[in-house]
């Protein structure tokens, strides 16, 4: 046989086999795509909660009764949402640099703090260890190295202020909502296996916790209250936020703030929140006098000069929340641990200091502290004589300085 004819036949045979293989691959890809249309969206859009409609649940999804202003990050209109995330991922948005890591001196807390004494230690982000009346309480515990799914997401800039191995036995955990930087399932499962604490959260979040192997969760809607022990209880209260773990399961689980009710004065934890109507701090105050307020001040800037977003308060509105709570002591959290926004690493506490200089009504009572530094919270005294409130417009005018404008 002519070698050239043989070579041509082999080439044709290879091409036919390649075409057949490609056809099979294409066929299965089409089948997989058609199946994905039916299977993937329900998987991503999981139903975490079923219940009657209410003033913040429409039968399918939860919502903010004071109106939703959480459509997307400011600046996402330039090139659309995809353009925003491209600039964010690539760092092409002109954001100020953050340090890769910051030094932290971890503390070793007491095993218990008895009676009306109250000690709070900021572990990082929204995680705070609160110790009082023989109980150890944790808010939104996260010891993960990244805040995101499958190990991806914002890396931790500041190591935890308490090593997990040095954490005393935990009696009570408050989980505000299901975002990855607040609901760290690996940490929660570790603490559950070790201590079996009472975990309090709002509807829908319990589904995720149970899926992670945490088989006992206390679920309370806004306005609910549960007794814990030693005269301590937990009330779940309104704030202004949203929830999601996947791409299309938005607002299938509720977000909340908390009031820990205690004989020596209450502890308020805002969770993750925007300002909304700013009426919800008064709802929390109805549970009694607040001795300590844990309030977020970071992740408020997604474009140059921005002072708040719909989902996150900055120092201006956080200070207003603090004033409305009437607490004598406030600790600023939710900054300097995971980079979630545009502002510089230390912009939130620096801006908070500037706000305090503009607010003589609460000056010296609400501050940022170092990660890992235990803070002994003073006992409640008599209500201080009220000072004239300061309007937001007055605060903004007071902050119109070269020093504040230079804060990025």
Image (cartoon, rainbow, N blue to C red):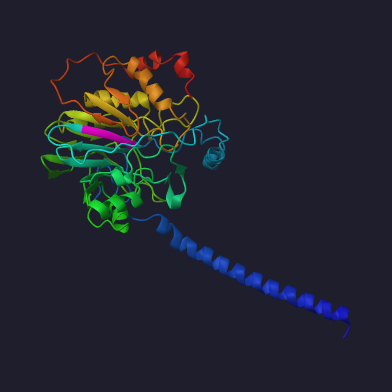
Residue 258 on image: x %, y %: 23, 38
Image quadrant for the N terminus? bottom right
Residue 134 on image: x %, y %: 15, 40
Q: Look at the image and give the residue range highlighted in magenta.
A: 119-123
**Which of these two is toward me, 146 or 219?**
146
Above or below, 15 against 199 in this view is below
Give the main secondary structure, helix, strand or loop, of the magenta stretch: strand
Residue 188 located left or right of residue 377: right
Examine the rendering and report whether any part of residue 254 can be seen: no
For the image shown, how many numbered marks are present on the structure? Answer: 0
Q: Residue at x 23, y 27 (%)?
A: 325
Residue 350 on image: x %, y %: 40, 22
Above or below, 38 against 97 in this view is below
**Which of these two is toward me, 44 or 381?**
381
Residue 184 on image: x %, y %: 35, 48
Examine the rendering and report whether any part of residue 401 can be seen: yes
**Which of these two is toward me, 114 or 331?**
114
Residue 24 located left or right of residue 390: right
Asked whether 361 falls inside the magenta stretch, the response is no
Q: Residue at x 24, y 57 (%)?
A: 215
**On the image, which quarter does residue 237 sit in?**
top left
Residue 141 located left or right of residue 301: left
């Amino acid at each position: 046989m002519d070698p050239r004819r043989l070579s041509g036949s082999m080439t044709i045979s290879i091409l036919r086999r390649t075409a057949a293989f490609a056809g099979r691959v294409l066929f299965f890809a089409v089948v997989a795509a058609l199946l994905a249309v039916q299977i993937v969206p329900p998987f991503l859009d999981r139903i975490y909660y079923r219940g009657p409609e209410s003033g913040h649940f429409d039968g399918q999804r939860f919502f903010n009764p004071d109106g939703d202003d959480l459509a997307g990050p400011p600046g996402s209109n330039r090139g659309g949402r995809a353009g925003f995330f491209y600039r964010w991922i690539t760092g092409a948005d002109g954001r100020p640099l953050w340090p890769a890591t910051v030094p932290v001196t971890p503390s070793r807390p007491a095993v218990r703090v008895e009676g009306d004494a109250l000690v709070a230690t900021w572990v990082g982000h929204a995680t705070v260890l609160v110790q009082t009346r023989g109980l150890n309480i944790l808010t939104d515990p996260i010891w993960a190295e990244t805040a995101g799914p499958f190990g991806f997401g914002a890396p931790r800039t500041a190591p935890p202020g308490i090593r997990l191995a040095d954490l005393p036995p935990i009696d009570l955990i408050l989980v505000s909502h299901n975002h990855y930087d607040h609901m760290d399932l690996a940490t929660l499962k570790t603490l559950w296996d070790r201590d079996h604490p009472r975990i309090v959260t709002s509807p829908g979040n319990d589904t995720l916790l149970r899926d992670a192997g945490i088989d006992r969760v206390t679920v309370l809607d806004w306005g609910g209250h549960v007794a814990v022990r030693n005269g301590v209880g937990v009330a779940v209260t309104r704030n202004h936020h949203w929830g999601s773990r996947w791409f299309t399961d938005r607002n299938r689980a509720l977000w909340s703030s908390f009031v820990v009710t205690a004989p020596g004065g209450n502890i308020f934890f805002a969770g993750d929140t925007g300002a909304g109507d700013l009426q919800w701090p008064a709802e929390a105050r109805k549970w009694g006098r607040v001795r300590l307020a844990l309030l977020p001040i970071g992740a408020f800037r997604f474009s140059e000069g921005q002072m708040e977003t719909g989902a996150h308060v900055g120092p201006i509105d956080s200070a207003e929340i603090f004033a409305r709570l009437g607490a004598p002591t406030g600790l600023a959290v939710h900054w300097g641990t995971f980079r979630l926004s545009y502002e510089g690493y230390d912009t939130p506490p620096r801006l908070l200091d500037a706000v305090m200089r503009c607010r003589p009504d609460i000056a010296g009572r609400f501050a940022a502290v170092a990660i890992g530094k235990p803070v002994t919270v003073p006992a409640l005294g008599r209500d201080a004589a009220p000072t004239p409130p300061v309007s937001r417009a007055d605060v903004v005018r007071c902050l119109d300085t070269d020093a504040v404008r230079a804060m990025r």
